[in-house]
Amino acid sequence: MTHRATSKRSRFSFIGETIAELKKVVWLTRREMAYLTFMVLVVAIIAGLVLGAFDYAFTNLVDKLFLGG
């Protein structure tokens, strides 16, 4: 088994390169972020309601068919 020697210089250069790449990122505006967050919440709530409705329907179906409810 071989070990690669990691020098302190390469660690700091990695951090510097990471910061340099993060400066190139085009960040969302506050308005875009709020809009997209709202959309994610709406889609999650709708998906939860649809799945809840399916669960309720199948639970009642199984109760009536198999349990004689």
Image: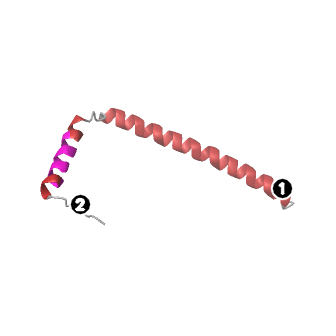
- In this view, the residue in front, 20 or 50, is 20
| Residue 43: image location, x then y, percent | 52, 40
Q: What residue is shown at x 69% (from left), y 51% (from top)?
A: 55
Q: Does the magenta stretch include residue 17?
A: yes
- Outermost bottom residue: 1
Residue 5 found in image quarter: bottom left
- Outermost left residue: 9
**Amino acid type, mark 2:** Arg
| Residue 60: image location, x then y, percent | 77, 54
Q: What residue is shown at x 63% (from left), y 44% (from top)?
A: 50
Magenta stretch, residue numbers = 11-20
- Compared with 57, 3 (above or below) is below
Residue 2 found in image quarter: bottom left
Instruction: Report whether 44 appears left or right of 9.
Output: right
Q: Is the magenta stretch mostly helix, strand or loop?
A: helix
**Amino acid type, mark 1:** Lys
Q: Nearer the viewer, mark 2 or mark 1?
A: 2
| Residue 31: image location, x then y, percent | 33, 33
- The residue to which callout 2 is attached is 4
Q: Helix, strand or loop at disc 2?
A: loop
- The residue to which callout 1 is attached is 64
